[in-house]
Amino acid sequence: MTSIVLKNMVKDYPSFRLGPISAEIPQGVIVGLIGENGAGKSTLIKCLLGLKRIDQGSIEVLGEKMDRQTYSQYEKIAVVFDELPLAENLKISQVGRIAKDLYPSWQEEKFSIFCQRFALDPDKKVKELSRGMQMKLGLCLALCRDSDLLILDEPTGGLDPLVREDFLDDLLDFIQDEKKTVVISSHILSDLEKVADYIGFIHQGQLLYLDAKDELLDQHGLVSLSWEDYRDLDKEKVLGKKESAYGVTILVNLKDWSGDYERPSLEDIMTYTIHGRGIQ
Ligand SMILES: Nc1ncnc2c1ncn2[C@@H]1O[C@H](COP(=O)(O)OP(=O)(O)OP(=O)(O)O)[C@@H](O)[C@H]1O
């Protein structure tokens, strides 16, 4: 079953175009969205949620065409943005009570367990929370509903490494139910390398890749070359390069390479690919 289907989707801003993007995201996976600042990740997320109107194509989410006016499945979608959209005088305990009234599937007990684990004092007001604590509250609110699709835009930026690790475990717990799907954008690529099953790589509004993370990692290699060896190399093979005083390190697709190589990280693949576009 698919959870999200994009068909030739385009979003135009006066000086930026996202798309056209055609892609399918299955259920039961964590999709990590990666890309440089301004690549289009948040725009894509807003389009998925119907917060931005698309200019061409279509988006289907949880089996229904996404149209802000008519979409009926918002109860099944939980969202965390990098800012918490809550009145600042509300206490955390009041936020929990509002969520209970708002969401039929609200899990009250789970919320208090999460608050304890994230050291969120129920008597504190939203305005008294640090940025990281606000992020934690946003994550609690998203994880304590029975949603089928969890969408997170840069959720871990303000979190310390210990909380981030707990949170990544929570995401893995969440998708134990294979009907559920997570879409998460992050610049902390090591987090995505740990938990994502799929990677969506956006660059300058184009979706360069949307597929299994392991395939992306397995099909690339990093190769260190002397300047002489680099000079003689067929540059068609070079997906990206970085220069140093000793020579050149290049990113290659292993189907074009038979020599020694090192396994790249997700961050290597992203940075080399972006640096390398246009190399001849
Ligand atoms: N409301 C808007 N009006 C006009 N242009 C916009 C608007 N929102 C975003 N953009 C442009 O769309 C492009 C993509 O922005 P977006 O926020 O989607 O990038 P991003 O990949 O999420 O970046 P970051 O990693 O910095 O958060 C940028 O060039 C931005 O200036």
Image: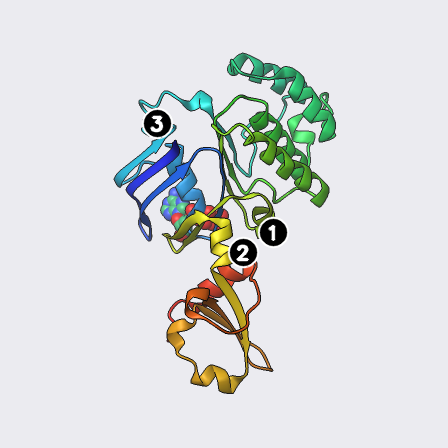
Label 2 near label 1: C-beta < 8 Å? Answer: yes
Residue at 37 percent across and 70 percent down: it is: 278
Side (left or right) of 13 relative to 153: left
Which kind of residue does numbered mark 3 sit on? Answer: Gly
Q: Amino acid at mark 1?
A: Ser
**Residue to which mark 3 is pinned:** 63
Q: Earlier in the sequence, mark 2 or mark 3?
A: 3
- The percent position of residue 113, horizontal first and vertical second, equals 70, 22
Dot 1 or dot 3, earlier in sequence: 3
Which of the two discs, 1 and 2, labels the residue nearer the N terminus? Answer: 1
Give the residue furthest to the front.
258
Q: Which image quadrant is residue 154 in? A: top right
The colour style of the image is rainbow
Residue beneath the point at 31% across and 50% down: 14
Residue 7 lies, in percent from the top left, at 28, 40
| Disc 1 from disc 2: Cα separation | 7 Å
Helix, strand or loop at disc 2? helix
Q: Mark 1 — residue?
A: 190
Query: Which label number is shown at residue 266?
Result: 2
Camera-nearest residue between 108 and 129: 108
Camera-side residue: 216 or 209? 216
How far is disc 2 from disc 3 in space, using C-alphas? 31 Å
The answer to whether one can see residue 141 in this image is yes
